[in-house]
Image (spheres, rainbow, N blue to C red):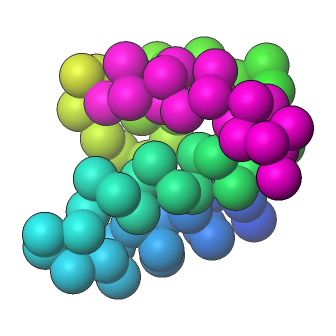
Amino acid sequence: MDVALRGKIKRAIDGAPRNGYVAELHLQVIKYAELLDGVSGREFCEALELGPAWGTEFAKMKKIAPRLRLAG
């Protein structure tokens, strides 16, 4: 993962309110889905120092991102 992209995502997630952490993670993955193409859930979690369980959330959001774009 690109260092600059990692920094943007990390800052956004770290700056999210405690009750908005998961939503912010989802938003960031959807927002940058095209730039995260080829990045595995494991790589994403390691780059952002997240537990491996977040890899599932990463995969879900990458799958939904193209559908959201098509829906406008």
User: Which residue is more in the foreground, 69 or 40?
Assistant: 69
Q: Is residue 14 above or below residue 72?
A: below
* Region rendered in magenta: 54-72
Horizontal relation, residue 62 to residue 54: left or right:
right
Q: Is residue 1 visible?
A: no
Horizontal relation, residue 34 to residue 40: left or right:
right
Q: Residue at x 64, y 46 (%)?
A: 30
Q: Is residue 7 above or below residue 27?
A: below
Query: Residue 63 at what x, y percent from top left?
Result: 64, 21
User: Which of the 4 image quarters holds residue 36?
Assistant: top right
Q: Is residue 6 magenta?
A: no
Q: Is residue 64 visible?
A: yes
Q: Residue furthest left?
A: 19
Q: Is residue 56 above or below residue 31?
A: above
User: Which residue is more in the foreground, 33 or 48?
Assistant: 33
Q: Is residue 66 magenta?
A: yes
User: Which residue is more in the foreground, 37 or 65?
Assistant: 65
Query: Residue 24 at what x, y percent from top left?
Result: 40, 63
Where's the N terminus, which quadrant? top right
Q: Residue at x 70, y 55 (%)?
A: 31
Horizontal relation, residue 38 to residue 56: left or right:
right
Query: Residue 14 at what x, y percent from top left?
Result: 33, 73
Query: Residue 71 at what x, y percent from top left?
Result: 79, 42
